[in-house]
């Protein structure tokens, strides 16, 4: 995918535990999928949280993006954008560019290396259609 290979995949309890540990507390009970990708270009991670419906995924998206602010997080330069008809929250931090968005009942967080992150997002969004 985009010249990157899936190096590790977490599902079930392992993915749930990883997401909660990443946030230093319990942030979700929903099903999670995490893919760690790597290649010559660098690394990317795709986090997917699966909600029962679009409304719950969208509510989680709103709650998550409200909590990310320059005052209380490692992220900066945050803004909403509309890409391919999707509302996408874009932020920077930890040496990467991050994209947060909802597709159907799934909440996505994609992390990629800044120099090719936009191209990776465009490629990934095309796989969702």
Image (tube, helix red, strand yellow):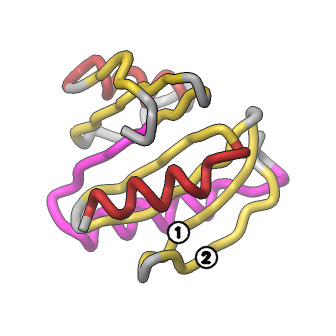
Q: Residue 35's quadrant in the figure?
A: top left
**Nearer to us in this view, 3 or 11:** 3
Q: Position of residue 25 (x, y in %)?
A: 50, 29
Image position of 9 (left or right of 75): left
The residue singled out by tag 1 in the image is 88
Which residue shows up at 48% across the image and 34% down it? 45
Image coordinates for residue 51, horizontal then vertical, percent: 22, 55
Left or right relative to 96: residue 121: left
Whether 67 is among the magenta residues is yes
Instruction: Determine the residue positioned at 41% across, 22% down.
Output: 18
* Residue 55, x across and y down, in percent: 27, 73
Query: Label 2: which residue?
Result: 81
Q: Quadrant of residue 81?
A: bottom right
Q: Name the N-terminal-most of marks 2 and 1.
A: 2
Q: Who's the residue at 80% across and 53% down the image?
A: 76
Magenta residue check for 10: no
Contact? badges 2 and 1 (CB < 8 Å): yes
Q: Which residues are magenta?
A: 46-71
Q: Quadrant of the N terminus?
A: top left
Residue 100 got which mark? none
Percent coordinates x, y for residue 68 in the rendering: 67, 54
């Amino acid at each position: 995918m985009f010249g990157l290979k899936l190096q590790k995949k977490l599902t079930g309890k392992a993915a749930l535990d990883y997401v909660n540990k990443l946030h230093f507390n319990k942030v979700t009970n929903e099903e999670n999928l995490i893919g760690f990708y790597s290649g010559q270009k660098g690394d990317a991670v795709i986090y997917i949280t699966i909600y029962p419906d679009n409304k719950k995924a969208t509510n989680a998206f709103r709650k998550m993006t409200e909590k990310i602010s320059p005052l209380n997080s490692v992220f900066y330069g945050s803004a909403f954008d509309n890409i391919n008809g999707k509302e996408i929250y874009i932020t920077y931090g930890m040496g990467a560019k991050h994209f947060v968005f909802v597709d159907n009942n799934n909440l996505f967080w994609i992390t990629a290396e800044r120099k090719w992150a936009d191209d990776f997002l465009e490629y990934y969004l095309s796989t969702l259609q």
